Image (cartoon, grey):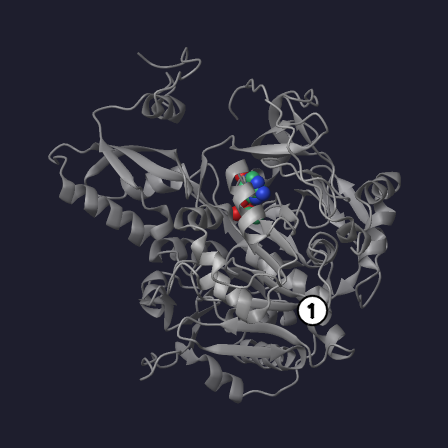
Amino acid sequence: MSEDFDVKLVEDVKSYTPDPRYKKNSWLGDYRTAYDEFLKDQDAFWSKMAHELEWIQPWDKVKELDYPYAKWFTNAKLNITANCLDRHVSGDRRNKAALIWRGENGAEKIYTYQQLLSCVMRFANVLKKVGVKKGDRVCIYMPLVPEQVIAMLACARIGAVHSVVFGGFGAAALNMRIQDAEAKVVITADVSIRRGKVIQLKSIVEEAIINSSSVEHVIVLRRQSPQVELRPNLELDFYEMMRSVPADCPAEVMDAEDTLFTLYTSGSTGKPKGIVHTCGGYMVGTYYTSKYVFDIKDSDIFWCTADPGWITGHSYIVYGPLAVGATVFMSELTPDFPDAGSYWSLIEEQKVTIFYTAPTAIRMFMKMGETWPDKYDLSSLRIIGSVGEPLNPEAFEWYYQVIGKKKCPILDTWWQTETGMHMITTMLGEPMRPGFAGLPIPGIEADVVDKDGNSVKPGTGGFLVVKSPWPSMLRTVYGDDERYRKYWYTIDGVYTVGDLAVKGKDGYIMILGRSDDIIIVAGHNIGTAEVESALVSHHAVAESAVIGKPDFVKGNSIKAFVILRVGHEPSDKLRQDLMYHVRMTIGPIAVPQEIEFVDKLPKTRSGKIMRRVLKAKEMGIDPGDISTLDE
Ligand code: WTA
């Protein structure tokens, strides 16, 4: 972790208070009252939330702590799909739309809760038929289509552990994730379609499984006609298989602490971390926040623009909203295709009421101008949200005025793959302060502290930490428990998030960005080490260092400094080759925007690259303490 730092906050007194009816009509009611109730008896608070769901067998204890580990709802039995599907099908929501999907070519699919359950049970039987058992790992590498959600829920139905890999990752990144999880089955599609471009997903899978001995089958959703050929025995058709199995599939009885899924996120080494989430706590956390933070009601149409391949999609397209019985809208369209009005036209068409997107998209919309949203009727919106990186005050204002029409509260939600659910936001009805995410939600004790763990004074900066366990916290890092322990021992006694933050006068928290070697580019976490090792795997590269540079739309862009091996000369052609190499290795999201060829890199005497010095030089600012710099 980097040194302590000194931030003096110039407090902007600006704040917006939503119409009091938001608070009055919300599931939560008053924030302070709910937070005090939580503080008074934390276990009782979570027990009350958990009791809103269906359990096969109740818990003995709400939580059992054994620092740095925690178990939640011990010995309880459940199945998350019984809560996301069967619970609604046996009640009034049987024929309610669960999922509405729009594809790029005007395609639309709607699944009622009953229909979604039927598909999930059939696909769960497909997984059983190909030999998948409780505890087996299944890799899902798919486009943003409803079948991706069906595949995830089908795994959960039978207790298989899904590991979803975002469809934008390249073959090497996919290969690493398949190998690390020892996936038995990969579920994919022939193609994904983005901005009218067809990407051959299946070919990437073919390359990714060449040396993956664990993979027994690849199940392929064939979207295009004529249909692509399948390799006999290895590759199976998604829908043909569904027709060949029985309709019913009872939900597997899962222990609350059984693994529900793993999901990879960037870390400070080249190897991503497989974050492990369990059935019971994750279900309670995502259900609770979908209901009490987003305030989802039966009449809402909820649209989270993420891909299910990220944690945002796991928690707020799939598990959370379905657990509350919401109507979820999902779309394969990008914000700028077929034109810059695509999202606004969908909000008008679907009468979306809750819209959840990323600051990078909001800043892109700002750049494209108000004429686009102004062409459409956005009056159905009642709540708008943001996630993934800091929502800067300018973007807040634009989102509030142009999209929310000064009426919709903004939920700027801070959380992580590791936390599984929202942790900090400004709850409905509370005064919103542009630039500040807000306060810890009821159920969460978060704070900004110095490097010794002491709470900082209002107006000063420090490290963002969580002071006590919460139900949907990660349980470990798959196959690497040491990395899990690091979260809890960086600052003793608390969970260190890896973000820098400032506390305002009233306790409101402003998130400044990462304190470690992770760059958030367009809302995606990219480890500098991941990009550096991709570059070094190119035959012309001897060494490299990667930094993030501020970018108006993407938040950050990637710049790489590269030292070439003897016998290679800098050229534009080589620069292009290196960019292509990163694209093929990790994926388009990690491609450096700039590559500079250099003769040496600033290092500490122990040989550690000082990216901070590179960054300061790049931006023409003072590099701070360079006493450890070699030379
Ligand atoms: C950043 C995404 C500021 C933060 C759910 C965090 C944010 C990392 C916000 C986790 C926000 C997420 N304001 N920063 N509202 N939300 N972040 O794992 O740096 O993809 O640590 O989870 O994104 O990214 P992840």
Q: How many marks?
A: 1
Position of residue 601 in the picture relative to residue 155 (left or right): left
Q: Position of residue 570 (x, y in %)?
A: 14, 35
Q: Position of residue 410 (x, y in %)?
A: 63, 47
Q: Nearer the viewer, residue 616 or 187?
A: 616
* Kind of residue sitting beneath label 1: Cys
Q: Quadrant of ligand 1?
A: top right
Q: Please, is residue 79 above or below residue 283 in the view?
A: below
Picture quarter with the C terminus? top left
Q: Secondary structure at mark 1?
A: helix
**Residue 604 found in image quarter:** top left
According to the picture, the residue beneath numbered tag 1 turns out to be 84
Q: Is residue 438 visible?
A: yes
Q: Is residue 182 visible?
A: no
Q: Please, is residue 153 above or below residue 5 in the view?
A: below
Position of residue 566 in the picture relative to residue 524 (left or right): left
Q: Position of residue 468 (x, y in %)?
A: 74, 37
Q: Nearer the viewer, residue 349 or 155?
A: 349
Q: Position of residue 326 (x, y in %)?
A: 68, 67
